[in-house]
Image (cartoon, rainbow, N blue to C red):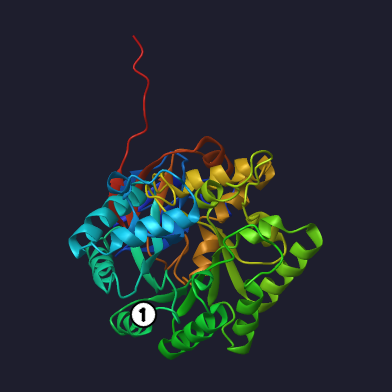
Amino acid sequence: MITDSAFDHIFRQAAIAGRDTPVDIGVKAGRILAIEPYLAADALDVALGGRYVIAGFVDTHIHLDKACLLGRCGHVQGGLAGALAAVSAMKRDFTVEDVYARGALALEKAILKGTTRMRTHVEIDPRIGLRSFEAIKALKADYRWAIDLSICVFPQEGLTNDPGTEELLTAALENGADALGGCPYMDTDPLAHLERLFGLAARFDVDLDFHLDFDLDPSWLRLEDVCRLTEARKYQNRVAIGHVTKLSALAPEPFARMAACLAESGVAVTVLPATDLYLMGRDATQNIPRGLTPAHRLHESGVLASIATNNVLNPFTPFGDCSLLRMANFYANVAQIAPDGFGLCMDLVTALPARLMNLTDYGIAIGNPADLIVLDAPDAPTALAELAEPVMGFKQGRQTFLKPPARLCSP
């Protein structure tokens, strides 16, 4: 038992994963120094009362540059093609200041909902140039006190068919972009699109994160090309794919084959429930397909999977509060997950996306940053089932927000 005054803070009676009873967490200089049943030391105590504590939610796929656009687009038809056209037209007029302001709105929502790590996809092409990238770089610097932001630049409207885009992507990677994405279904030569991006990623030694197979036609899957290229380029465990709604339309046997292909090649999958459910199946008049890729079944097959936000208050997804806990609850409801799977649903927005982003310092463990989010619940399954509010947050031991639990005002 540590008995000296070695700590700046002691978080008292924290319920954490892997422990049957609450523990004290001792923090010094922004890092976790001790985790014990009781720490006898003089420090600033933070009483948690047995509430569940996580290292923060991890959002692997969001578009801060396109957030909060509903007030200016008047887009109501809801289809993917219409959403793409609406945003493509608007982004020509985006300014650095505009993207920063809208991105900040979404980022602050995410912080207050307990997100401490995030990968945001940012469009790069000759229409927007590097304006969105510069805005998101500024957000990354200005909000580092509360969240670690990773920037994934990508060509939303194609690459081989859009001259000048590859040069702009290169400039962004030379100037601080953290990862590289792609959107082969928007390119006239999808395979060349993928091959060029694999080459560019290897040149800059960054991870890859593709938008892929975003429809419900299971007769062909571009993910097979991604798996093949991942193995050929020795990029295992550095490639993720988002959406992949085609997987939801596969029968059990071909689904198992595709899951095995993903697991063997080390390609991760991010499921985006809000956008996928909103956009898929719009041609159906009855028995409307959900279009939701089963992340839990992929996990059971050995595939690294996560659940993320994607779009917020724009033509792709005209709702959202950046709560990953709500997204995991939403997924569990739609995917018909029983209570014995609620813990996994929490993992899909915490520990598993941290692995997808190759974060080596995530988690409540000695030596890691004291990134702590306190949920108003005793454990992970209860937090998921009841959509427990984050009541306080800390980044490297410094408090980032406080939301006292709601109280009834009886007469």
Q: Residue at x 52, y 35 (%)?
A: 386
Q: Is 321 positioned to the left or the right of 234 in the image?
A: left
Q: Is residue 128 above or below residue 381?
A: below
Nearer to me, 96 or 48: 96
* Furthest residue in direction left, as rendered: 97
Callout 1 secondary element? helix
Q: Residue at x 37, y 55 (%)?
A: 86
- Which residue is disc 1 drawn over? 165
The type of residue carrying mark 1 is: Thr
Nearer to me, 269 or 301: 269
Q: Is 71 positioned to the left or the right of 160 in the image?
A: left
- Observer able to see residue 396: no
Occupied quadrant, residue 162:
bottom left
Q: Position of residue 11 (x, y in %)?
A: 38, 49
Q: Residue at x 48, y 89 (%)?
A: 199
Q: Is residue 196 above or below residue 57?
A: below
Identify the image quadrant of the C terminus.
top left
Q: Is 99 positioned to the left or the right of 379 in the image?
A: left
Q: Position of residue 241 (x, y in %)?
A: 55, 68
Occupied quadrant, residue 253:
bottom right
- Observer able to see residue 160: yes
Q: Is residue 194 above or below residue 382?
A: below
Q: Position of residue 131 (x, y in %)?
A: 24, 70
Q: Is 98 positioned to the left or the right of 358 in the image?
A: left
Nearer to me, 246 or 86: 86
